[in-house]
């Protein structure tokens, strides 16, 4: 796991955990910095840019999949652009509910604030190996129950945010490009997933933003699960595959 602090970057590759774990910027010759964030959405990206939390110099690439476009996806309440008063108590990352509540109540009992610190640095977590058939099946079942039956209206806010990011890039003379991130074809993409991603592509193409569609570009042995690459092979191959495209003038 690696960390980086907020600062200025010339070339930025943004996305969610797929980008975090899949793009090895230290092995890339492109000069892009990986600033993927856990559960990151397009709305998060716009907030980051609009509030000047990260300054992009000349180029921005967004790694898109249906999770980066999903309005109802749980996210991290400690990200600094989450300002609503109720957030620290009601809007938790699903993997952090218990420790936040336990630690928070402990703080209160000691006369301290419920949550003492916010997100000070962004962590990169990688995925190793390949899930076995049962593990992958369990993950598919969970995602199907939670997300795959949602209509396109559950993506409206992030599609609107994509328009705002495009406008921001145009106003600040930032070259913007996007990648549709690879999908493990052990199962067919759900219809709503396809529709959400195609809706984003329509917006991007309407503004003449270049899109590299890698939906089915990588074989299943390079995946840890449905979308995350395994670090041993998939991340290395993904970085190699996109490097020449990233370096195109």
Image (tube, rainbow, N blue to C red):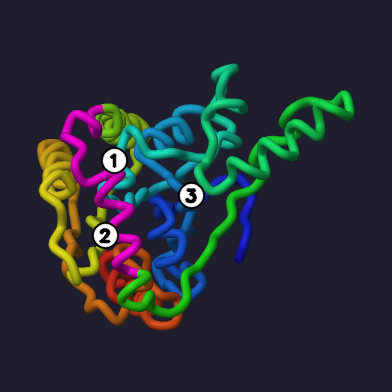
Region of the chain picked out in magenta, as a range = 136-156
Q: Is residue 221 above or below residue 171?
A: below
State the predominant SS element of the stretch in magenta: helix
Observer-nearest residue: 102 or 211?
102
Residue bearing the label numbered 2? 181
Judging from the image, what secondary structure is the residue with disc 2 in? loop
Give the x, y percent position of residue 213. Answer: 17, 59
- Is residue 216 at least partly visible in the picture? yes
**Which quadrant holds residue 69?**
top left
Query: What is the CA distance from the residue labelled 2 to the residue labelled 1?
Result: 12 Å
**Mark found first going from the N terminus, 2 or 1:** 1
Q: Relative to 222, is 47 on the left or the right?
A: right
Check if residue 155 falls in the magenta segment. yes
Is disc 3 surrounded by few (<14), some (14 to 19) or many (20+) residues within 10 Å? many
Quarter of the figure that contains the C terminus? bottom left
Q: Is residue 170 visible?
A: no
Callout 2 environment at 10 Å: few (<14), some (14 to 19), or many (20+)? Answer: many
Residue at x 60%, y 36% (from the top left corner): 78
| Drawn side of residue 6 relative to residue 189, left or right | right
Tell me if residue 108 is in the magenta stretch. no
Name the residue at 75% across, 31% down: 105
For the N terminus, the quadrant is bottom right
Q: Residue at x 61, y 27 (%)?
A: 88
Residue at 43% x, 79% y: name it. Answer: 129
Q: Earlier in the sequence, mark 3 or mark 1?
A: 3
Circle 1 Cα neighbour tier, 10 Å, few/some/many (<14 / 14–19 / ≥20): many
Query: Can you identify the residue that label 1 sits on?
Result: 69
Front-most of residues 170 and 96: 96
Q: Read off the residue under disc 3.
A: 37
Q: Secondary structure at mark 3?
A: loop
Q: Position of residue 205 (x, y in %)?
A: 12, 43
Q: Earlier in the sequence, mark 3 or mark 2?
A: 3
């Amino acid at each position: 796991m690696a960390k980086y602090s907020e600062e200025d970057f010339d070339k930025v590759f943004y996305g969610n955990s797929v980008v975090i774990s899949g793009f090895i910027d230290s092995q890339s010759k492109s000069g892009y910095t990986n600033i993927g964030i856990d559960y990151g959405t397009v709305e998060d990206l716009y907030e980051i840019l609009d509030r000047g939390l990260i300054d992009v110099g000349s180029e921005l690439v967004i790694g898109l999949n249906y999770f980066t476009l999903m309005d109802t996806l749980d996210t991290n309440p400690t990200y600094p652009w989450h300002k609503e008063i109720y957030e620290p108590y009601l809007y938790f990352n699903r993997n952090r509910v218990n420790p936040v509540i336990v630690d928070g109540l402990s703080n209160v009992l000691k006369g301290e604030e419920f949550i003492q610190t916010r997100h000070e640095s962004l962590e990169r977590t990688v995925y190793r190996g390949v899930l076995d058939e049962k593990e992958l099946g369990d993950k598919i079942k969970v995602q199907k129950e939670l997300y795959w039956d949602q209509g396109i209206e559950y993506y409206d806010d992030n599609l609107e945010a994509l328009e705002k990011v495009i406008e921001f890039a145009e106003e600040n003379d930032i070259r913007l490009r996007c990648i549709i991130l690879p999908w493990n074809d052990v199962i067919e993409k759900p219809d709503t997933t396809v529709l959400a991603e195609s809706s984003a592509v329509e917006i991007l193409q309407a503004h003449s933003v270049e899109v590299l569609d890698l939906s089915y570009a990588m074989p299943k042995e390079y995946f840890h699960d449905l979308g995350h690459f395994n670090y041993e092979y998939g991340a290395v191959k993904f970085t190699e595959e996109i490097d020449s495209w990233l370096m195109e003038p």
